[in-house]
Amino acid sequence: MEPVRTCVGCRTRAPRSALLRVVAIDDRLVPDDRAAMPGRGAWVHETDECLAAALRRRAFVRALRVSRPLDAQTIEKRLNGYGNKVNGSK
């Protein structure tokens, strides 16, 4: 039985393999593809809708327990460019 996590964007539960783990490093959101980086992580679907909802609701700030805004450029680039082509979604 595969572990289940909750997407911080749409708040739905999904298998861990269907979500991307994100960690905060020096005020930046960084994708954790292997889900092995140290520290607190947040899980999100790799879609523009879930990422936008999470950023709009400040869900990453709450889930990662940081007190300042986080730069999401790394995650946005991944979803809008390279990441979609690899996953075949666009």
Image: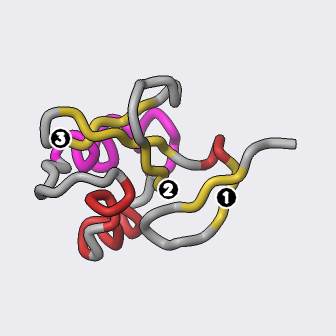
> Where residue 85 appears, x then y in whole percent?
41, 38
Query: Which label was assigned to residue 28?
Result: 3
Provide residue 46's location: percent of width, then percent of height. Answer: 45, 52
- The amino acid marked with disc number 2 is His
User: What distance separates the C-alpha of mark 2 from that of mark 3?
Assistant: 18 Å
Pick the residue in front: 86 or 33: 33
Residue occupied by mark 1 = 14
Residues under labels 2 and 1: Cα distance?
A: 9 Å
- Going from N to C along the chain, the mark reached first, 2 or 3, is 3
Q: Earlier in the sequence, mark 2 or mark 1?
A: 1
Q: Is residue 89 one of those drawn in magenta?
A: yes
Majority secondary structure of magenta residues: helix
The kind of residue tagged 1 is Ala
The magenta segment:
73-90
Q: Is residue 87 magenta?
A: yes
Q: Colour scheme in the image?
A: secondary structure
Location of residue 59 by image quarter: bottom left
Q: Which mark is residue 86?
A: none
Task: Name the residue tied to disc 2.
Answer: 45
Q: With respect to residue 69, does 58 lie above or below?
A: below
State left or right for residue 57 relative to residue 40: left
| Front residue of 27 and 33 | 27
Q: Residue, x 70% and y 50% (percent of image)?
A: 15
The answer to whether 47 appears left or right of 75 in the picture is: right
Please tell me in which quadrant of the rendered image residue 57 appears. Answer: bottom left
- Label 1 Cα neighbours within 10 Å, binned few <14 / some 14-19 / many ≥20: some
